[in-house]
């Protein structure tokens, strides 16, 4: 299992991935799930992967040499000469289908599904930043202002904080903090996601970045964030009034204790039993 998240903002892009691929009582494996493709002053792209490790590694290798031809006479589109991120995503889809053609039948005979999920984003000179989620069939969707982030892998634990915080106007540093909180929530609830983490922050129109970091259990910022997030959640939880029983209201006894004590709405089943 894994967890990867990528966020597209007006100010830039944030990418974060864990590195755990197998978890058990006596077996934990670590592999990088992020790869950066960079050509200074021309293009900057990041690929995040989840799913079967052998499939994703094959796709990553083929992607660097894959040529997509719409016609036989074409020179061929690669991630290095594509004029748009959309075309680069098409090349990635072609690489996925090539691996599928080569390995899917053998994997099926061995009882293994062709399972891979990818997030691919970046910027090519001449257009704005773009972010795509790519599926195991090679098809993909693009991030929008209404949906400015993508997750792959174990996504459910880290989604609520992203939904509450992230908008296209969110500053990069704040989005990076939110991504790390999202990851921390996932680490807390699922042992199959684990450190170290890889994070890349990309500023719009830079076509390179020096904000690349590997975060392990000794990273002081992540340790502080982990401790503070848990403590602040507890403080907020404790600040909310507890429900209380009011003996004067026998029909709907549960009341919210506040300056205006309002009864909870009655919900009845067909036989009018209160639930």
Image: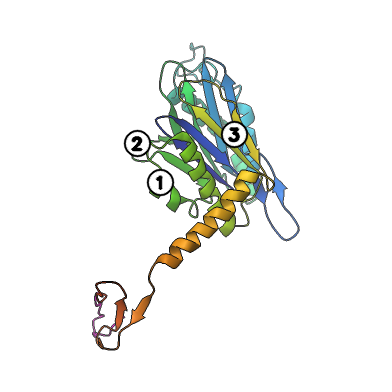
Instruction: Residue under label 2, please give it.
Output: 145
Q: Earlier in the sequence, mark 3 or mark 2?
A: 3
Work out whether residue 185 can be spotted.
yes
Q: CA distance from mark 1 to mark 3?
A: 37 Å
Q: Earlier in the sequence, mark 2 or mark 1?
A: 2
Find the magenta span and give its range.
Answer: 265-275
Residue 53 at x, y = what percent?
A: 64, 42
Q: Height in image: 78 above or below 140?
A: above
Instruction: Please report the residue visible at 33 percent of the width from the left and 40 percent of the height from the top.
Output: 146
Instruction: Residue under label 1, please give it.
Output: 165
Q: Height in image: 155 above or below 7?
A: below
Using a 10 Å C-alpha cutoff, classify the residue at mark 1 as few (fewer than 14 neighbours), some (14 to 19) or many (20 or more).
few
Work out whether residue 1 can be spotted.
no
Q: Height in image: 41 above or below 265?
A: above
Residue at disc 3, secondary structure: helix
Instruction: Residue under label 3, please give it.
Output: 99
Instruction: Please report the residue visible at 39 percent of the width from the left and 30 percent of the height from the top.
Output: 10
């Amino acid at each position: 299992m894994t967890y990867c998240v990528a966020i597209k903002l007006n100010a830039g892009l944030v990418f974060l991935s864990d590195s755990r691929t197998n978890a058990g009582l006596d077996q934990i494996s670590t592999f990088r799930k992020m790869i950066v493709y960079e050509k200074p002053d021309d293009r900057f792209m990041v690929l995040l992967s989840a799913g079967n490790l052998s499939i994703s590694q094959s796709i990553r290798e083929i992607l660097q040499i894959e040529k997509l031809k719409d016609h036989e006479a074409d020179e061929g589109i690669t991630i290095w000469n594509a004029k748009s991120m959309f075309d680069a995503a098409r090349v990635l889809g072609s690489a996925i289908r090539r691996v599928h053609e080569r390995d899917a039948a053998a994997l099926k005979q061995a009882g293994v599904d062709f399972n891979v999920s990818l997030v691919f984003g970046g910027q090519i000179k001449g257009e704005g930043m773009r972010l795509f989620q790519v599926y195991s069939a090679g098809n993909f969707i693009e991030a929008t202002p209404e949906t400015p982030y993508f997750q792959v892998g174990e996504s459910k634990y880290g989604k609520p904080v992203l939904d509450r915080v992230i908008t296209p106007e969110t500053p990069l540093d704040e989005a990076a903090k939110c991504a790390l909180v999202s990851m921390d929530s996932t680490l807390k609830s699922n042992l199959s996601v684990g450190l170290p983490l890889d994070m890349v922050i990309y500023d719009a129109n830079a076509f390179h970045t020096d904000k690349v970091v590997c975060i392990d259990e000794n990273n002081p910022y992540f340790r502080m964030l982990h401790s503070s997030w848990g403590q602040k959640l507890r403080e907020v939880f404790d600040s909310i009034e507890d429900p209380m029983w009011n003996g004067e209201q026998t029909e709907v006894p549960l009341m919210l204790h506040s300056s205006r004590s309002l009864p909870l709405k009655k919900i009845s089943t067909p036989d009018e039993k209160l639930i």
